Image (cartoon, rainbow, N blue to C red):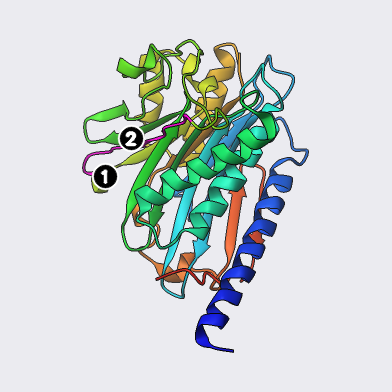
Amino acid sequence: MTALDSSRVLLKENAMQLETIKEHIQLWLSRTVGIGAVNELFESSIAMSCDIGNIRPENQDRVVCVQVQVTASDSFVIGVLCDGMGGMASGANCASLSIASFVGSCINNLQLPVAERLLKAVEEANSDVYSLYNSNGGATLSAFLYDSDGHFEAVNVGDSRIYANFAHGIKQYSKDDTFAGQSADAAGVHLSKGLLQYVGVGPDLKAQIVRLPKYRNIKRLILTSDGAHYIEANTFKQILNQKLSASKLCSRLIQVSKWCGGYDNTSVLIANDLLNIFSEPDKTSLPVGTVKLWDPFGEIQFIGAIALANKD
């Protein structure tokens, strides 16, 4: 067998492994869990929370953090939050499928620059959801990718949000894909639905990279679903400006969103030290080829599961 033939076989095996991982992730995210939970990881640098709220009969939010060990020294972390669209078909399944497709694509396209990889991942998630639901089901998606080489990018579709806290305070950097949200800094403000875009809308989807100027100066990165946006603006910012651990901030946002009525499911991902998580490789490294995924209710690992043959 030639080297080219060996490479083709490895790529084919890798593609099959990734499809299996996608299926397992989607199934795992569809398991029965409690009504609310908080999980912290990376020496408490990152935390996630998710709660059903006071009104909704089902939790259609999904939020995860994923670490992929590419080589002994190279790895990357993905944070992704999806809110299945209420009133449409299978919102929870759309959110789970969106995350599984998004994560699988980010792993499969290691050769692409980070921003292109995120856009490709949204495109593939949109295609997978659209093929099943034909625009009658969908999910929002807010995500970031940060790697051990220091590359960072974020992407957003829908009305879940990405905030960052620099020295000047909290600001929303994503734009809600609604008519009202396109021109608003809506931190802590709930805007009406009427989504212009969502994962599963079909071929017209145009995801946008979220530009965070001087991202190396980020003190805190926050992803939220719209259940958190019922919190009054000043209260929302005051909570996130406090010098608390990521897990305590997640818990506080969940509690306050429920005190404000708990009208929707609420999910939050907060990274207090995102840009420092690779500073001590011995504490964060996994076996090569391993994919580790956390959500607020637990974790799952695929140890040495992928060949990562397409890494240049």
Q: Quadrant of the C terminus?
A: bottom left
Residue at image mark 1: 215
In the rendered image, residue 206 lying in the magenta stretch gets the answer yes
Q: 25 or 3: nearer the eye?
A: 3
Say few, some or many: other residues with alpha carbon within 10 Å of mark 2 (under 14 / 14 to 19 / 20 or more). Answer: many
Magenta span: 204-214
Asked whether residue 212 appears in the rendered view, the answer is: yes
Residue 44 image offset from top left, x and y in percent: 48, 50
Q: 79 or 236: nearer the eye?
A: 79
In the rendered image, residue 26 lying in the magenta stretch gets the answer no
* Residue at x 48% of width, y 10% of height: 192
* Secondary structure of the residue carrying numbered label 2: strand
Residue 305 versus residue 105 in the image, above or below = below
Main secondary-structure element of the magenta-colored stretch: loop
Residue 103 image offset from top left, x and y in percent: 55, 50
Pick out the residue farthest to the right: 32
Residue at image mark 2: 164
Residue 187 versus residue 303 in the image, above or below = above
* Residue at x 54% of width, y 12% of height: 260
Residue 187 versus residue 3 in the image, above or below = above
| Residues marked 1 and 2 touching at CB (< 8 Å) | yes
